[in-house]
Image (cartoon, coloured by chain):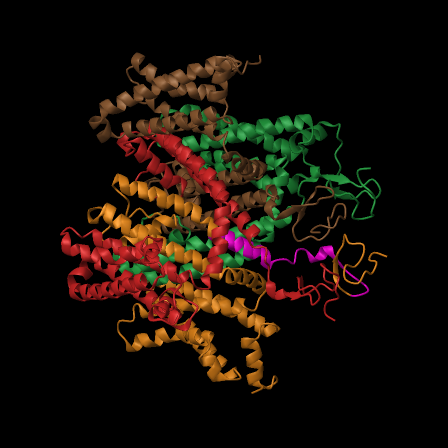
Chain colours: A orange, B red, C green, D brown
Amino acid sequence: MAIDRKSLRGKLFITIFGAHTRPGRQFDLILLWLILLSVLTVCLESVPSIRSQYHNILHALEVFFTIVFTIEYFLRLYSHPSPLKYLFSFFGIIDLLAIIPFYLTFLLPAGHFLVTIRILRLLRVFRILKLTSFVHHAHVLKTAIAASLQKIAVFMLTIVALVLIIGTIMYVVEGEQHGFTSIPQSIYWAIVTITTVGYGDLTPKTAVGQVISSIVMIMGYAIIAVPTGIVTVEMSRTQPEKKKSENTECLSCGKSMPVSANYCSHCGHHLHE
Amino acid sequence: MAIDRKSLRGKLFITIFGAHTRPGRQFDLILLWLILLSVLTVCLESVPSIRSQYHNILHALEVFFTIVFTIEYFLRLYSHPSPLKYLFSFFGIIDLLAIIPFYLTFLLPAGHFLVTIRILRLLRVFRILKLTSFVHHAHVLKTAIAASLQKIAVFMLTIVALVLIIGTIMYVVEGEQHGFTSIPQSIYWAIVTITTVGYGDLTPKTAVGQVISSIVMIMGYAIIAVPTGIVTVEMSRTQPEKKKSENTECLSCGKSMPVSANYCSHCGHHLHE
Amino acid sequence: MAIDRKSLRGKLFITIFGAHTRPGRQFDLILLWLILLSVLTVCLESVPSIRSQYHNILHALEVFFTIVFTIEYFLRLYSHPSPLKYLFSFFGIIDLLAIIPFYLTFLLPAGHFLVTIRILRLLRVFRILKLTSFVHHAHVLKTAIAASLQKIAVFMLTIVALVLIIGTIMYVVEGEQHGFTSIPQSIYWAIVTITTVGYGDLTPKTAVGQVISSIVMIMGYAIIAVPTGIVTVEMSRTQPEKKKSENTECLSCGKSMPVSANYCSHCGHHLHE
Amino acid sequence: MAIDRKSLRGKLFITIFGAHTRPGRQFDLILLWLILLSVLTVCLESVPSIRSQYHNILHALEVFFTIVFTIEYFLRLYSHPSPLKYLFSFFGIIDLLAIIPFYLTFLLPAGHFLVTIRILRLLRVFRILKLTSFVHHAHVLKTAIAASLQKIAVFMLTIVALVLIIGTIMYVVEGEQHGFTSIPQSIYWAIVTITTVGYGDLTPKTAVGQVISSIVMIMGYAIIAVPTGIVTVEMSRTQPEKKKSENTECLSCGKSMPVSANYCSHCGHHLHE
């Protein structure tokens, strides 16, 4: 169903969903700040000392944000050409999750953890960014990562297998008296170690355990080269458009040629006449 | 010895060892899930709280998996053209290690740590994956790593020497009163530090020790660039087959040419007629 | 306003601001050492045991450095063609911040933390280095980083969003009893984990928390490949000047050709006659 | 002074210093094992429990290694064409340091830490490796690192400045009550954090401190891309000799050509006749 661009609904659609128009950009900018401020409110509300002191202000802000986002939600629903499609789209669900926890706290008493769902409002930022100049760079990154996804999957699978076997060995070597109480716990230790995070909540105590740990650490240190290598190679492949400014256009066939060429490599036309 | 493909043994061989046929793929898929579930069972069994509560279910599952894998083992042995070769092959031994610990627990009382050998069942996953589309990517990774193995060996050797000398220095500087009780212990600390794992179970307490640690950390931070560089360069070398979809085939000589070319660079045939 | 190079002011300008002349280089070298020594003094002064023991020597040194830097500051102000421009330039402010804390301690009693501003003297080192051979390499690094800044921004934004959502999940999963007292605290944990720092001051205690942590760690381990890939690709692009020593110059058209070439690829002139 | 290759001294020189002859290689192999075993002895001797139990065996081994290395030292001195040059060469000093601590323990009573100097014997391994096939790969690594040394120096300087300023800020923010007792201590914390080591012996306690730490961690996480990029680019530049096995030799002019070429690009000779 096409929308009449001059009707109220059409104007709303352009403002809310479009970013290429002036009112669309302004709407996005205001929304971006509202989202960030509401996320900040959720964060601050979770801090016990702030919650007890500024409870009223934070609650008032939350009511304000929820009302604004609720209005926005219904305007989106109203102005969208096919409201049902919007309702079940990824961002449609995120938009709903951004407002519904607040209303549910009136119904359910134990809404403490429910309200944290509101943090998902942050994801709405990505809808706005989708429409800005960030897109090109995000696309390059995404292409490079997607192209190397299968290689990364092989790599991950090897890591998982490695971590499982190392975890089991350490469970046997160190045993329950040194904190390696179960195989899953040992696997957790192995992941903490191989990724070089190293919390130190579980550490090898026996000599054999320390030798195995050392091998795992050095392995983890060397292994990190693999995903780096994969992504770098893929990235250098997806960015062949070096510096277009250094190219010239053949006047005969229109193909882009490097400035250093004397003849068009496509049609043989003499460049730089 | 050739196997008659239509005999029971031949059909079994195709199903169990082959992956390119429909029953072979189905067999692999079922086996994959059985292996993953049995590994999960081994893991869960090691958790004290789960072991005490669900002991009977876990034991029943273990009996089931062992029986299935035992049948599979004997079917493999029966259907393989040269059973002895299978028996002593890498996967033949893994297959045996996957079932034997269970039977040994009846003979030996202290089989607690023996049963953890069953985790090696996980390695059987790699046999299945060997026959899937993962193979190409695993191969590229393996080639790149193999090609750079010697360089990585030189790198590792330098790390080992570095770690030994740093460990000894720290043993002298920090001494036993700060936890650096022996040179091996100090070497363990040096590895924990240079790989940027940093458990924090051993930390320098003296000013001199902290200065040395700082140098070791920055060294470790810079050194990681070396294996990354090695693997990246090797990887970019082993993947020259850019995007085959963007190539066209010369109708005259059959060579693959980029779509952008007008003439075959091999025989001069005019492409895109 | 031009400066007469032979006047006292002109000579001072060349010595203090210029680095290409002999006295300018000598002035820079002395200043470099004075800055490093004064920074060292500030550092040592903050160590309680050293402060109490060598208080008089450190204070005398500080007075000396401040007097020298004050004289230098006024000489710069005097010799600079436009003193106002210098006064409000980046290095002009840094130069002022390097001396003013000392004088303020006479006026303000609680100058303890004020004196640490003197550490900013270190930044003055960069003015000196700006004028040395380091510049080329710093420039290559800066260009590569600047060119990839937008991609890094996209990457950082994704990290921030990831860290916020992971932090919130962990706040709900682990809860206040395990140290995840608020969402900001959990976000701090998520950053400590995803960057593979891993202090261990906050660690997951529940099984679900450890599973989520494991995923975060492996993510962090893989994600590091992205900025590395970005910078490497950008860096390899900004350094195309391979090895000029291996090139020869065509005697006919003057273009640079590789030594291995027999004919100039630009004009067809026979090289190596 | 030339050495007569057939004299005893000449034969000794070839055996001890040369690696390309059969006896030279055998001598190196034996020496390699002796060095590794003696280093292992030094390590084990430092472990309190092993020292008290196997004191006699370890002492006997140490006497044996010292006698062997002493004989070797004097043979090297005797057979070298210019003994003085050897005496003051890098490896001459290392060889002396490998034996002298043992003799000094008879003279000095407090030789406990002196004997740890013997760990430097390990460096002698590099003399042996210098003469093996490792050399080529070590050379490629060394060239790449050397070529990027200046860029790495700029990078390191920036890190040092960053770490100094961050350390000072944290000293002011966290203060002595949270373990940041002095600026050097805070700088140590900054290095532990920015290199992603993260011991956890010093951690930020205040909210502001945690925010600053988070920024430092993300910076450290992104900054690691820089040395990696530098080394990778340098490494890909120093290894242009792709795969020589895939080349063929032109029968007319002898130049190496890729197998895929039909005509020699140097002289026009038709390959694959």
Q: Quadrant of residue D172?
A: top left
Depth check, front residue: B29 or A70: B29
Depth check, front residue: D92 or B216: D92
Q: Residue B253 placed where, x, y %?
A: 69, 63
Residue A271 horizontal side relative to residue B6, left or right: right
Quarter of the image that includes the N terminus of chain C: top right
Q: Residue A11 placed where, x, y %?
A: 58, 81
**The stretch drawn in magenta includes residue A245:** yes
Let me know if residue C123 appears in the view.
no
Q: Which residue appears at 46% of the width and 21% of the height?
A: D16
Q: Quadrant of residue A185?
A: bottom left
Relative to residue B250, is residue D46 depicted above or below?
Answer: above
Residue A1 horizontal side relative to residue C61, left or right: right
**The stretch drawn in magenta includes residue D85:** no
Residue at the front extreme of this rendering:
B1
Depth check, front residue: C33 or C233: C233
Q: Quadrant of residue B33?
A: bottom left
Q: Residue B43 placed where, x, y %?
A: 26, 58
Residue at the right extreme of this rendering:
A273
Relative to residue D180, is residue A123 depicted above or below?
Answer: below
Relative to residue C94, is residue C152 depicted above or below?
Answer: below
What is the count of numbered marks?
0
Q: Residue B161 placed where, x, y %?
A: 41, 33
Let me know if residue A18 appears in the view.
yes
Relative to residue D54, is residue D197 depicted above or below?
Answer: below
Give the magenta range.
A227-253
Quarter of the image that includes the C terminus of chain C: top right
Residue A272 horizontal side relative to residue B109, left or right: right
